[in-house]
């Protein structure tokens, strides 16, 4: 896979300066969380503000940390990603949500988008594509 397309390395604040986009990573597997953290922190413009292991944990941490982006796994114990996405959208309607799935399914994608998810990402698509999609959903309008 080739290099990432050139995108702005940071978001612009309302004062004209550059800021890091903070990311909350939500997945029940510690190894996946570590891989996601590493992928985001190796890229300019991102910082990981926290990690959560299920949807309930994600809601608590999102309220405390106020992330710019939340990356949610679809399948988790306690509260899955769809239920968490619906709750997070009510609490933080302006925060984009990215849903991670093990395999791409148009039915799962439709359900995720109906739950308030901004973008759906298949884990096998690779971390570089995840970062590219994260930059796209955070791009200022």
Image (tube, rainbow, N blue to C red):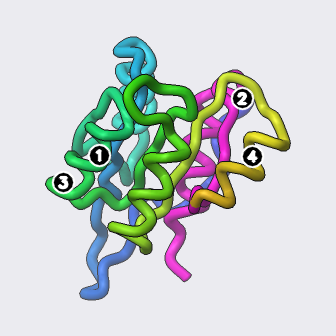
Q: Residue 70: horizontal and vertical position, in percent?
A: 41, 50
At label 3, counting other C-alpha atoms closer than 10 Å, the crowd grade (few under 14, some 14-19, many 20 or more) is: some
* Crowd tier of the residue under label 1, counting other residues whose Cα lies within 10 Å: few below 14, some 14–19, many 20 or above: many
- Residue bearing the label numbered 4: 109
Say whether disc 2 or disc 4 marks the residue closer to the N-terminus.
4
- Mark 3 vs mark 1: which is more N-terminal? 1
On whether residue 119 falls in the magenta region, the answer is yes
Q: Which of marks 1 and 2 is nearer the N terminus?
A: 1
Residue closer to the observer: 46 or 66: 66
Label 2 residue SS: helix
Residue plotted at (37% across, 75% down): 12
Q: Residue furthest bottom?
A: 15
Residue 65's tag is 3
* Mark number, residue 27: none
Q: Do the residues under discs 3 and 4 have CB atoms within 8 angstroms?
A: no
Q: What element carries label 1?
A: strand
Q: Which residue is drawn at 50% across and 40% down?
A: 81
Residue at which label 1 appears: 47
Report the span colored magenta.
116-141
Say which residue appears at 48% left-offset and 35% top-offset.
80
- Nearer the observer, disc 1 or disc 4? 4
């Amino acid at each position: 896979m080739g290099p990432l397309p050139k995108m702005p390395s940071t978001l612009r604040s309302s004062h004209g300066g550059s800021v890091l986009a903070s990311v909350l990573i939500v997945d029940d597997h510690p190894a996946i969380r570590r891989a996601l953290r590493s992928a985001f922190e190796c890229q300019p413009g991102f910082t990981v503000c926290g990690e959560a292991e299920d949807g309930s944990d994600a809601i608590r941490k999102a309220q405390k940390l106020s992330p710019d982006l939340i990356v949610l796994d679809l399948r988790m114990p306690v509260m899955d990603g769809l239920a968490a996405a619906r709750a997070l959208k009510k609490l933080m309607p302006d925060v984009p949500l990215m849903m991670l799935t093990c395999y791409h399914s148009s039915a799962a994608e439709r359900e995720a988008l109906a739950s308030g998810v901004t973008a759906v990402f298949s884990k096998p698509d690779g971390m570089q594509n995840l970062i590219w999609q994260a930059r796209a959903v955070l791009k200022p309008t």
